[in-house]
Image: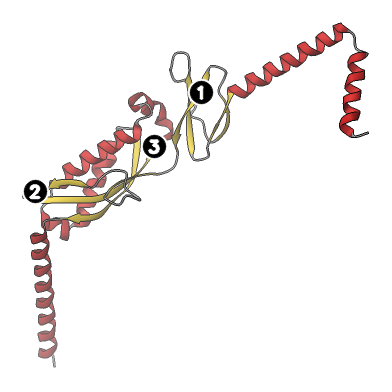
Amino acid sequence: MSESENCAVFVGEYLANTSDKTKCGSCCFCTLLIFILTIISVSIEGVEPTQWGLVMNNINQSLKDVPVKDGGLNWVGLTNSIKRYPSTIQTIEFSNIKKFATAGRLATRTKEGLELKISCSVQYRLIKNDLPKLYRLFEMDFNQKLTRIARNGILMIASEFTAPEFWKKREVVGDSILKFLQDEYKNAYAEVIAFNLLKIDLPTQYNNAIVATEVMTQEQIKFAETRRVMLTK
């Protein structure tokens, strides 16, 4: 006889030799145990290692006054649930590269009125201790709102520079935009880690003029160096 058959026989003999009162008590215990296990299972929620969690009361849709949850299993209670936010660095990219872009490239005008198209990226991270404030401000729509803040800030600061400055002072332009975004994101309970100017497009005729000027400048430098060498011989 197999082990499963032996087990079935044992259970059958046990039930046959057990009184109705004992059977009733066993059923009640099993029911209670299942109920307790169900309560425990719905009162525990998991948070990914790359996430933070806010505990939300499902009845009145308000945040619980408890610390922000880290990754792992967390006890939240029967009537609560967890709203999850990323704890890792997030990237917003304005470009026409479909593989990486989260929004289209930006179009504005330089200080002197030339058409300007910008491809760039912003890296940011949410501030853990400020997540309750972030939720009250944006709820779960934080990324779209932060994207809008970045777009408006980049366009505004970029329009304050002339076309030559985008060529000769690119780092200054990038630093100015970074500082502005850092201040704006701080008010939105996030921190900007980096800003990168990926590509700058100016009108073709202007680009050609810039290239011609650069070539002429390099030729002048080369001529001056050649003359200096000849005079020192």
Answer whether residue 59 is visible to the viewer in this image.
yes
Q: Where is mark 1, residue-wise?
A: 81
Label 3: which secondary element: strand
What label does residue 126 carry, if any?
Answer: 3
Q: Which of 172 and 5 lies nearest the eye of the viewer?
A: 5
**Disc number lying in front (2 or 1):** 1
Label 1: which secondary element: strand
Residue 13 x, y percent position in the rendering: 92, 19
Q: Where is mark 2, residue-wise?
A: 111
Left or right of 2, for residue 218 = left
The residue type indicated by label 3 comes to: Leu
Q: CA distance from mark 2 to mark 1?
A: 50 Å
The residue type indicated by label 2 comes to: Lys
- Locate the N terminus by quadrant: top right
Q: Earlier in the sequence, mark 3 or mark 1?
A: 1
Taking the view exactly as shown, the residue that stands out farthest to the top is 21
Residue 78, quarter of the rendered image:
top right
